Image: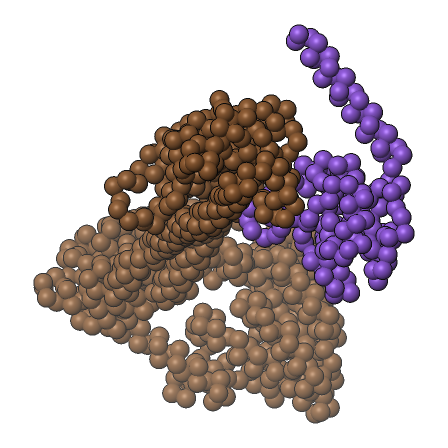
Chain colours: A brown, B purple
Amino acid sequence: MSNPPTESVEPTQDQNNTHSSETQHHRQNIIEPILFYPTALIAALILLWVITFDLIATTHQRARESAITSATALVYTYEAQVLRALREIDQSLNVARRSYELNNDNTMLPMLNDWSLLLPNFLFVTSITDADGNVINSTSTIEKHNVSDQDYFRQQLESDQLVLSRPWQDPYTKAWKLTFSRKVNTPEGSFGGIVFTSVDASYFVSGYEESQFGKRGVLGIIATDGIFRVRRSGEDIVSGEKVNFSHLLPNNEEVEEPEEPVVKLQHNSWDKVKRYTVASQLYEFPLAVVVGLSEEEQLQGAVQLKRVYLLRASAASFAMIIIAVVLLRLSLQLKQSRQKALQEQISHAKKVEYLAFHDSLTGLPNRSFFSQLLSHDIAEAKRYKRHLALLFLDLDRFKVINDTLGHDVGDELLKQVAQRLTKALRETDTVARLGGDEFVVLLPEMNDEKQISSVAKKILSSVGKPFHLAGQDLRVTVSIGISVFPLDGEDEQTLVKNADIAMYHAKERGKNNFRFYSDELSTDSLERLALESSLRLAVDRGEFLLHYQEKHDLRSGEITGAEALLRWQHPTLGLIQPMQFLPLAEETGLIIPIGKWVIEAACKQVSKWLEEGLPPRCISVNLTERQFTDAHLLDDIAKILHSTGINPAQLELEITESLLLRNFDRALKTLSKIKALGVRIAIDNFGTSYTSLSTLDKFHFDTLKIDGSVIRDIANEPSDKQLTEAIISVGRTMAMTIVAEGVETQEQADFLLASSCDQVQGFYYDKPAPPS
Amino acid sequence: MNSKKQAQHILKLALLAICFFMASAHSEVVVVVSATSPITTLSKNQVAKIFLGKSRLFPDGSKAQPLNQSEGSLERDAFYQLVSGKSPAQVKAHWSKLIFTGRGQPPKEAATNDAVKQLLANGSVNISYMDRATIDDSVKILELQ
């Protein structure tokens, strides 16, 4: 029921719209970072690795090219060195041969050596043989033997060319040697022997530099017979290996012109090392030079770089992943907190909206929302020619509960009443709280008066069950006024006003019931309204006046004081008695300004009497319940005492017994504060209610006023007599001044005198009258 | 036959070893120049450079013309050991490389200490080394720093 029909209620629709659009917005925000960061990460990783592999490939390619270039350069250099060395050897052999052929002197070799026409003899040993191969002269004294069994000697028999021996090992030093020879002719032109020179094979690879070739490069000379004359790798020098010559120089014979040497990456057959290998065949000799650079060594730098690049790329990838994850998490957190803030805003807005249209205490629609609902329902009822009932509810005695048990209890009661009303009604009905203890119920489609009555009865019985509040069971009743559309009004204001009037009459008729509106009610209400408005004006216009009834000392008969009694001099109705307007004043709260005026006027009268030279008199003023509970009472009294300047003891406030019993503790507090001002307090109408002696004792009243009803039948009723005596006796014991009210006969006065009553007032002495 | 040859070989080696021992014990190699040479002192390193083909000039700018004793002589081996700390094989390898790569020619050689003195005297060389025992007035010993 607190959920109104949606078609008419804009706030609800707005909420829905806002909500759905917000949800979509949220989804977009959540998806965005989840997609963005991984995509960016993958793109960055791909880029990183593409660059890294490209760099590695480039580095490798450069290293390969550099190895090939180096090998090519080295083979050219080596080829030139070998050629020069061979020519030097050939030249020195030719010198020796020619000298021998010309001089036929087999001792001239040392001499040639001394002249530096031969190669340095600490490296080269040059010798000459006869036709049988016997060494006949040598630069070395040790070289004296027969060489006819040597391959170069046999080869030389048939060759005029320079002959290179196969490598042979020195029997003593175990060093590999190479021997070069030339044929020596006799003067007759026949074979006369050979001249030959031997040198360490290592001589031809002494140019091996580790800085150029590395530890596993290769430098060597191979003959066309496929036998390595010498080969060096690092410090290892080997001679005599046979390998596949054509494998080193594959296309040698097919190429007409000597081409540039081609570097090939191959596993060298002799030591299984993979090298950038290049061989170049010498033009004049049946030899080829071989240069090789180990792939592993040449690419070592590149491989190391590759490792570094891979490591760096891996580290960078790792860092990027970490960063991406962190960013993703951070942005998700940001999104979430934004989302949360947004949702808080929305819920706050919803709350504000809800508060604007609902009563914060009970959660029911409030006055403005109800007004919308009502006008909507009226429009509906008009369109479909239906009836519509409006029930105006007011809790009886709510104010008393609020004042005596406190606002918290009052609020809790309102909540529970709201729950019960909601429960007692159908879904389509509406309950709203207009404020205070006023509720309205809207019954659409209610045509039958019986139906409406049964709903009203249901409400009465539902609210009538006791409420358990503040530790006690509380009974609350409700008065209901009912107006029906369109009979009792065709617009919102009229319907509400008429239901209110009907409610008021229900209340007047004894509360806890309901009443349908009728035109007569309206008339009554008008009177009441008129009275209320003129009462309001009366204060300002000074239409109130006070009458005084004197109090007499019984023994002396002197006037001791007076009780001030309120009268209303209405401009047209004349003098109005308090019972005719005081209930309305009390109900509407007008009693507060009126009461204040009464006290002030009474005090002024006291000081006036003093000015007139009369003896000091005490003035009594009645306090109503509402006055007594008014928060400003004490302030007001103090101000009045101050402004009039009278002795506070000349003012006496009269309080009824029943007023004390509503809230004992609070009353005690208020009374003690009044007494603290020096003002006297009288308990009025004593004997009509059930005040206990302990109550009297606690409040410390100054005066006890015996109610007129107690002493009325004193003459005839012995029990009344006894009661009066008892009261007087109690009062005296508690040191109170005893005043008897409503004394009308001589008998009563006599009796009271006999019973030691202090003072009296009543028609027997005088009627209330304006001050003389 | 065979065992006899072996025994002879061992004997030869033993004799050679004794000779080496005697030589090193009783002879000393000194660097010499002609008695008229203005040079009086060189460092070992400077001498080594000249004899290993790394330097062709004396510190005073004049041309150095070194003279070696013959390959395998005790003086030669002792000399290189003295000035450069190189063994005969290392010296040989060094010159092999220089000659093969065309970057130098080895010093002339003299077969005996007397030949050294003679060549120094006639001015065809101006620095050499020899056994201290064979020194005479025609040469002067170079102080090595």
- Is residue A511 visible in this depiction of the protein? no
Residue A155 placed where, x, y %?
42, 29
Residue A678 placed where, x, y %?
73, 73
Residue furthest to the left: A384
Left or right of A110? Residue A133 is left
Name the residue at 62% across, 48% down. Answer: A116
- Is residue A77 visible in this depiction of the protein? yes
Q: Quadrant of the C terminus of chain A?
A: bottom right
Name the residue at 48% across, 87% down. Answer: A540
Above or below: residue A70 compared with residue A542? above
Name the residue at 57% across, 70% down. Answer: A630
Residue A572 placed where, x, y %?
38, 87
Left or right of B136? Residue A328 is left
**Image quadrant where residue B17 sits:** top right
Residue furthest to the bottom: A612
Q: Quadrant of the N terminus of chain A?
A: bottom left
**Image quadrant where residue A200 sits:** top right
